Image (spheres, rainbow, N blue to C red):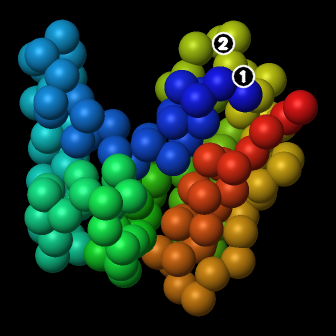
Amino acid sequence: MTTIFKGIFLLLSSLLLIAAQNPQVDKKLKKQALRLHDYCVKKVDSNTEYLLDALFNKTEHTDAFKCYLHCIYDTFGLVSNNNEINALNMLPMVPPEYHDMVVDLHSACDTQPGKDACDIVYATAQCYYRFDPR
């Protein structure tokens, strides 16, 4: 699996951070991404600087980072009321050439155990990142 594809899943939650920094991103998309990012930052009482550092492994992944991931995954409709994660809900958001990999990813990782909803999303995102179909 390519690094870019792995990034789609771990960094799905950070799409907002990246979109905000990319000058080639459509202004309307950037505005929507920033709105969602701001919502999740406020919800977890964190800040963009910390989240960027955590994203690039420059600092420890705290509960704030894990809950930020949960907020994004939940907003994208990937988390059920029972805190089960369904990567298949991502199919409409990824190009068709990646659909088989999403199915494989979902089969391999499903929902990883965790102590709470935020930890479950974080553990599952880590599984997505480590997943290698070879």
Residue found farthest to the bottom: 115
Mark 1 highlights which residue? 99
Residue 78 location, x and y as percent? 55, 51
Mark 2 highlights which residue? 96
Query: In the image, what residue type sits under mark 1?
Result: His
Q: Secondary structure at mark 1?
A: helix
Front-lying residue, 74 or 50: 50
Q: Secondary structure at mark 2?
A: helix
Numbered badge on residue 113: none
How crowded is the residue under tag 1: few (<14 C-alpha within 10 Å), some, or many (20+)?
some
Front-lying residue, 31 or 130: 130
Instruction: Please tell me whether residue 25 is drawn above or below residue 46 in the rendered image.
Output: above
Q: Residue at x 39, y 71 (%)?
A: 61
Q: Residue at x 13, y 44 (%)?
A: 35
Instruction: Please tell me whether residue 52 is drawn above or below residue 92 in the rendered image.
Output: below
On the rendered image, what quadrant is the N terminus found in?
Answer: top right
Q: Are marks 2 and 1 in contact (CB under 8 Å)?
A: yes
* Res 114 quadrant in image: bottom right
Residue 67 location, x and y as percent? 37, 71
In the figure, is residue 71 to the left or right of 85? left
On the rendered image, what quadrant is the C terminus found in?
Answer: top right
| Residue 98 seen in the figure | yes
* Res 115 quadrant in image: bottom right
Front-lying residue, 114 or 28: 114
